[in-house]
Amino acid sequence: MTSTVFDRMLGFRYEQLLTEEALAKPPGKHMFFLAFPGNTAQDAQFLDRWLRNCNPKCRIFYSSIPGDWQKFLRLEHGVAIIHEEAIWSIRLFPHVNKLLYPSSKFNFVLFSKSLQPSPLYPSLAQPCRAGDVTLQPLGGQRRAAILVTPSFIISQPQQIWNFFKWFYKAWKNARSHFSLVVCADFDGWLLEIAAEKEKAWSRLTNRLRDDQKERVTKEVEALYKVKECVRNLQDMSSEEQPGIILGPELIDRNDEQSLVNWFGWWSVMNLDRYRRFTVIGSSTTDVGRLTYCTTRPDFITSSSSQDVERTEALLLSIQHESEAQHRFQMVPDDTSVSLENYLNRLSDRNQKQYNLAIYTRPVGYWDEATSGVHPDDFGTYSDCIQQFKDKIARRTAKTIVVLCYTVAEKSSHGGALRDVGRKRRPWFVVYRPMNLQMLHWKEAELIIWDPLAKKAFHDDTDMYEGDLIEAQRIIIQRLRREHDMLPLNRIWIGGWNTDRPSSVDPLDTTLQTLERLLLDWRNNVPIPVPAMWNKGWKWVQRGHAPFQPRTRSPSPEPMDVDTAPEETDTNTADEVSKIVFDPPRAMKPNGKMTCKNRFFQSCMYEKVRGAPKGALEYRFEPTMQWYKRQFEEGSGFEHINFMTWEEVFAKYKIENPKEVRRDVR
């Protein structure tokens, strides 16, 4: 019966999950691995029943059972079914790239419940209603994306030309199979490298110039040839079959670590179109050729989150602290560290209210996909929802307060980069059971306080969920889809008495209001519905308001117009400030990163000592050297194959010019 329901109502076909090789095997040889988070156990059981109903002899392995993944790795073929909430954990599956490469032996499938407002993989989106369950093939186009690292280009210009010659030929013969990923403005950067090599050569003595002339000439010619090859690839590319994919402009072209970390995020975002991912890096044999003179970029302030040398950090913090102190009254600045310290102090002061708990980690991201790649440490909706579950289930608290500091829009393709420089919107949320005074709870309510909410409605109008900002709508949706929590029944919103001078930041207003409410919580946030109305809280109705003229200024984004205006960028178009794209959070208990961004540190050091911007002499670290440290720290990418350029040349039998002598600087 179960298989009939799946087949007819949901369009599932057991046979479509299997590889051709597995279809030829007896039923007892059909192997499945279910990668489902602990909070999706019901989904795993549901899928398990269907698989066994279709084939009682199939064998199923589970991510929840220690050792099952290692057993699955040793199989000759199989199907890995990954829950949409676990897709970002694929980077942690040991040796998963070994299963991604033999595309004829293993299939990867996404289990989706269509609960997000927009699909994770638009190309896989099927016509369905919210809540419908679908199985969608990942890596179905079986394409390969290859990232060419900056240090490989800097250290081996002639080998780079030979690599591009090989790729150009391979891509022309099979455009649907390959794409190269490079830094932004790649062809312009190649010209800069060529010019720098000629400039360095011209500064040599006459004898050294004569010695190096042939080598430098060949390297410059190789770089120009690569540039023309890139142009040809771009001209021949299409959106469906791109030969060249450019990285984000917010990452400096010399910042290899940020580019690789971005590629780790991008690769998961594109698992619907690509299956195999490779990073071609420099090796320890290239050390003498890894120095490059370039212009030091400016960095967006929030990128300066990594620890630098103590003296550098001290000098850098002086200006930042004075600006932050001028802007904020309640906290030194609006970083996650300052807000967490504030919330800890506030929680300590309110320990007498034993039925109320303050979550001490500020929440900044509802998009689980990108939280790990932001250069800060704000929490996610999953973090705070888990707090709701734990506190209420154990009855260690009846009311939980969470401070949110979210950006205006959901991160998407490249969104994690834009969020770094975007202004955040402060608000706080309260979760508690309805009829709190009762012994047995049946439903819950959510209370939102937003200092900018007064702009979205008037006292004489009804409030609807459609009038909330997207971040608030998303947390409501997330709570409603949780099966092991009290059903969410009522939503309240407040934002009264927020007339403030423009010099007072909304964050200060939010924190001041929270402190005032905590002074007399029972009276300020009462339990009875009439009392809540009397205190100014407004009941939020489901859906959207009926269409009618509204007295609000026109806006291209009618749902999310309540954010504070963006500050004008003082940089010119050709001086875009850069960011540091940090690796995913390490798995170490203390959560501290030991793998620093060398390019950022070098820039900060030069800035502190007052060196000219146009004279940064940066020495790349070999790719395999810095990535080894990052991987051992727990911030690696198991789904990506990291190879030195020598290994790539040997594997694909690419022509390798004679060993060139070291650059003379």
Image (tube, rainbow, N blue to C red):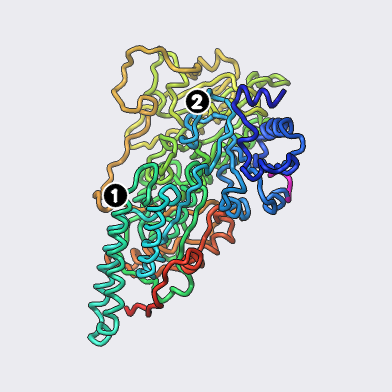
Measuring 31% from the left and 68% from the top, which residue is drawn there?
222
Q: Main secondary structure of the magenta part?
A: loop
* Vertical side of 202 occupied by 176: above or below: above
Which of the image's four quarters has the N terminus? top right
Give residue 518's quadrant in the image.
Answer: top right
Numbered circle sitting on residue 298:
none
Q: Nearer the viewer, residue 383 or 52?
A: 52
Looking at the rendered image, the disc whose residue lies closer to the viewer, 2 or 1, is: 1
Which of the image's four quarters has the C terminus? bottom left
Measuring 45% from the left and 41% from the top, which residue is drawn there?
330
* Vertical side of 44 occupied by 201: above or below: below
Q: Taking the image as drawn, is residue 491 in sight? A: yes
Residue at mark 1: 235
Give residue 24's quadrant in the image.
Answer: top right
- The local crowd at label 2, few if under 14, some if 14 to 19, many if 20 or more residues have their Cα within 10 Å, is few
Say which amino acid is labelled 2. Answer: Pro
| Tag 1 secondary structure | helix
Q: Does the magenta stretch include residue 64?
A: yes
Residue at mark 2: 127
Q: Which of 588 and 127 is in front in this view?
A: 127
Cα separation between marks 2 and 1: 34 Å
Left or right of 171, for residue 638: right
Measuring 68% from the left and 33% from the top, which residue is drawn there?
47
In magenta, the rendered stretch is: 62-67
